[in-house]
Image (cartoon, helix red, strand yellow):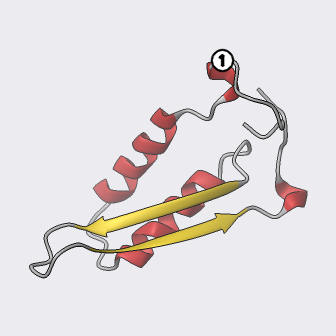
Amino acid sequence: MRTGRAAEDMRDVFSYDLITDGIRMLVGAGHVALAETLAERIAAMVLGHPRVTKVVVRVQKLQTGSGVVGVEIERVRPAERAVVGTS
C-alpha cells in the first residue's frame, strides 16, 4: 500500500502469493551460486509490480557448515515510475 493511510482490507496490501510464486519460479529456473544474485533477482521481480515502490530482501544460506551466511539489500523504484494509490 502506498496511499499514506492504514490498510483497511486485502485490496490495500500487495499479495504475498505473488511474491512467493515469483521466488519459486526464480529458484526453480536453476541453481544460483551467489546469495547476492538471488537477492537482486528477487528485488527486481518484486519491483516489477507497479504497486511496489520499495523492497527489502534478505537471503540466507542455512547449511554452510560455519553457521548462517546471508545478505540483505534494499531497492527503491524511482518516483517517476511508481504507481501510487491503485487498487
Q: Residue at x 84, y 34 (%)?
A: 85
When the figure is inspected, residue 55 is found, relative to residue 86, above or below; the finding is: below
Seen in the image, is 47 located left or right of residue 62?
A: right
How many dots with numbers?
Answer: 1
Looking at the image, which residue sits at the far right? Answer: 80
Seen in the image, is 84 located left or right of residue 15?
A: right
Q: Residue at x 28, y 64 (%)?
A: 30
When the figure is inspected, residue 48 is found, relative to residue 34, above or below; the finding is: above
What element does badge 1 sit on? loop
Query: Which residue lies under the disc numbered 1?
Result: 9
Which corner quadrant of the image does residue 63 belong to? bottom left
Q: Tell me the crowding category of disc 1: few under 14, some 14 to 19, or many 20 or more residues within 10 angstroms, Cα based.
A: few
Counting from the top left corner in percent of width and height, residue 72 is at: 47, 70
Q: Residue at x 49, y 61 (%)?
A: 57
Counting from the top left corner in percent of width and height, residue 20 is at: 41, 42
Q: Amino acid at mark 1?
A: Asp
Seen in the image, is 5 located left or right of residue 55?
A: right
When the figure is inspected, residue 66 is found, relative to residue 1, above or below; the finding is: below
Counting from the top left corner in percent of width and height, residue 78 is at: 82, 64
In depth, the one of 30 and 78 nearer the eye is 78
Q: Quadrant of the N terminus?
A: top right
Seen in the image, is 20 located left or right of residue 4?
A: left
Looking at the image, which residue sits at the far front? Answer: 6
Q: Residue at x 23, y 72 (%)?
A: 68
Q: Quadrant of the C terminus?
A: top right
Looking at the image, which residue sits at the far left? Answer: 65
Which corner quadrant of the image does residue 14 belong to? top right
Counting from the top left corner in percent of width and height, residue 83 is at: 83, 44
